Image (cartoon, rainbow, N blue to C red):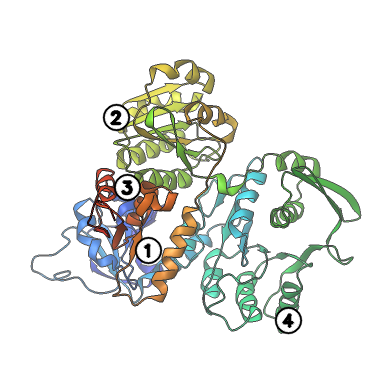
Amino acid sequence: MKYAIRHIAEIVGGSFLQFRGDDAVEHLLLDSRRLIFPDTSLFFSLKGPRRDGGLFIEELHRRGVRNFIVGEALPGAGTAGERTLAGANIILVDDTLAALQRLTAWHRRAFSIPVIGITGSNGKTTVKEWLNQLSEDSYQVVRSPKSYNSQIGVPLSVWQLNESHELAIFEAGISHKGEMGKLQRIIQPTIGVFTNIGEAHSEGFQSHAEKAAEKLQLFTEAEVLIYSSDQPEVVRAVNEWRTRGDGRPGLFAWGHAGDAVVRVDAVEKNGGATRVRIIYLGQKMSFDVPFTDDASIENVMHCLCVLLYLGQQAEQMNQRLQRLTPIAMRLELKGGVNHCSIINDSYSADLSSLSLALDFLSQQRQHPRRSVILSDFLESGQDEDGLYTSIARMLTQRNIDRLVGIGPRISLHADLITKWFTAPAVFYPSVEEFKKDLHQLHFRDETILLKGARVFAFEDIDRLLSEQIHQTVLEINLDALTNNLGQYRGRLDPATRLMAMVKAFSYGSGSFEIANLLQFHGIDWLGVAYADEGVVLRKGGIRVPIMVMNTENSS
């Protein structure tokens, strides 16, 4: 959807410092590194303890952005003299983050589809992703990218909503009191899922009860709240919340207790799978879950309850359960043939996840070239010409060196794609045709992103391109690393600089990958043991300052 800039100014309660024309805005921009569509982007100049968005305004203006929301006047703006941002729309507001949240809350109110809001101490992202996998055959789904559940992430997630969507799934996370009310006004969930209550993010609360009460505010206007009656703290918090009259949703509990709406009758673990037997509305059902750990079974039960509430059939749900994939598999980075690196994200195909995958690809500097193998984007709900034009522009903006398109739809739009994406591109109608031609594509010394809908079974391509050496795998959770960096920064004075040690190939976890991620998130220094390690990082494209701890060749 597009909004006129005058309308946006009214929604956010801002005033124009400069006005050039009633531009149409389609994309919200908070990070200058993610600029793709300058002519339809609106930049919010957010100010944090370490980063001031105002420092990037002039750069974005040079790159073609013409619409800005700022929290303070810019030098020369609105005067008769020379203006800093000639020919730009500049809206002044009291608080740029609040303006972002008001705009996206307004946008959310334009839709009457079911909206699932998920919160809890653990499992939010897994439940969201599994709900998407289980429901995408029945609905056109929009969901939070990755773990976009913060005061900034939630608005960006909700902004994705458009007329084609039939179901929305958003997660919400908090660290302090007073935060969930803001997220509730943005998400406005009709279906609530409370995963659990635990130790995560407890620093800003005096007790679990206080934290649970804050999280429950997400469901104040929901139709129904889904939770586990096997969790005493959750049950206690829900009962107190209802007694106070703060929440009005119907309760949809699952658990072993006889009064649960979905009563768990038996849990039978056998090998690598689990059979869960339940009773719902007097009917006995059984579901085969492709996991055996308790956390996964709990997450699956939340998902099953949502689907039962939405009226999905048990037989259909059972079939889809077998396709669930562990969320840790997403954005898997590993060694490939001919000195290549492979990023495997072949579990979904939509513009939001493509943008995130391309950002991850851009962070990898160990090879001079970057290639993308891309399938058809199915059931996007968008006009295909516009869809594949957007994809081509995203690839161009990320400086991708080669595109391999696989599928009848992307092949049909080859001419349109190559109009915008001028680097080499080749198209195949199927994975089988690609495999026949693989030896002529000469993948060597490059980073390759595999991005495809599950129906295309890119696993075959992954096996062909991956280096086959041994069966031992070390998995590094880059999201956890990013979160840890944020936790350290949150406890340090903003003026304190931060150095991360990446010596000895980041202690065996991969120096390029770790250093690239840290550089992307603004680390001040990197530390290595010896000069040759720093040289390797420089050759790999690392530009932040590097401190060598040992100046001698040996010790």
Left or right relative to 236: residue 386: left
Left or right relative to 382: residue 275: right
Q: How far apart are marks 4 and 3 (CA)?
A: 48 Å
Q: Is residue 124 above or below residue 94?
A: above
**Mark sitting on residue 161:** none
| Local SS, label 4 | helix
The residue that label 1 is drawn on is 8
Q: Distance between the residues labelled 2 and 3?
A: 19 Å
The residue that label 3 is drawn on is 37
Residue contact between numbered discs 1 and 3, judged by CB atoms under 8 Å: no
Left or right relative to 199: residue 442: left
Pick whichever, 15 or 152, lies toward us: 152
Q: Residues within 10 Å of mark 1 (few under 14, many from 20)?
A: many
Q: How far apart are marks 2 and 1 (CA)?
A: 37 Å
* Residue 408 place in picture, x, y as percent: 50, 23
Q: Say which amino acid is labelled 4.
A: Glu
Q: Nearer the viewer, mark 2 or mark 1?
A: 2
The residue under the point 91% across, 55% down is 282
Pick whichever, 96 or 528, lies toward us: 528
* Residue 330 place in picture, x, y as percent: 53, 45
The residue that label 2 is drawn on is 423
Q: Nearer the viewer, mark 4 or mark 3?
A: 4
Residue contact between numbered discs 4 and 2, judged by CB atoms under 8 Å: no
* Residue 200 place in picture, x, y as percent: 58, 69
The residue that label 4 is drawn on is 240
The residue under the point 51% across, 39% down is 349
